[in-house]
Image (cartoon, helix red, strand yellow):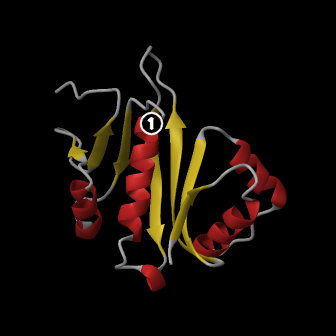
Amino acid sequence: MIAYQRLQSNDDVWLKRIVKTFRQQELTDEKAREILQNKKIRIWMAYEEEHVCGYVLAYVLPRIDMGDDMLMIYHCFVHENYQHRHIAEEMMRRVIDDARKSSMHYTFLITQEDNSPANALYQKLGGHLHEENKNVYYWYGTGEPKL
């Protein structure tokens, strides 16, 4: 059974597995601690037993005005052995819900216009395409579009 969680400061073993699985790199303990202790970096994962199935990496971006912070989703990956099981959908749903609960002004991501599976997923999750930036999806929390 697939389980989901947002990584916390003591999840260095999971973070190292994510980097090894998806980036084929060994992450040092020091780097893992640095990332997990950074309040501006958020990572969610899907796993089955000891295997990482997928992850979402996002960054909290402060605004220069009095509005709430924004969340930029930077990566959403599902391992090929786990694709077509709605894992990306569930991870993204959790990320968007968490951002709303955290009073983020909005959540956004950038994708390619020709990435049909990703675009279909983001639309299914209620993402709004920006009027001018056709490959930028937004999920509004406390902010509303000013078009």
Q: Position of residue 107 (x, y in %)?
A: 38, 40
Q: Is residue 14 above or below residue 128?
A: below
**Could you say which quadrant of the image residue 65 lies in?**
top left
Q: Quadrant of the C terminus?
A: top left
In this view, which residue lies farthest toward the front? 1
**Above or below: residue 1 compared with residue 28:** below
User: Which residue sits furthest bottom?
Assistant: 81
Q: Is residue 31 above or below residue 118?
A: above
Residue 115 x, y percent position in the rendering: 27, 66
At 75% across and 56% down in the image, what residue appears? 32
Q: Which residue is mark 1?
A: 101
Q: Amino acid at mark 1?
A: Lys
The number of numbered badges drawn on the structure is 1
Residue 119 horizontal side relative to residue 3, left or right: left
Single out the residue that lies furthest toward the top.
66
Residues 102 and 112: in front is: 102
Q: Position of residue 117 (x, y in %)?
A: 26, 69
Which residue is drawn at the image coordinates 67% and 73% (left, top)? 20
Going 43% across and 32% down the picture, which residue do you hit? Answer: 104
Q: Is residue 18 left or right of residue 78?
A: right
Give the side of residue 17 with respect to residue 58, left or right: right
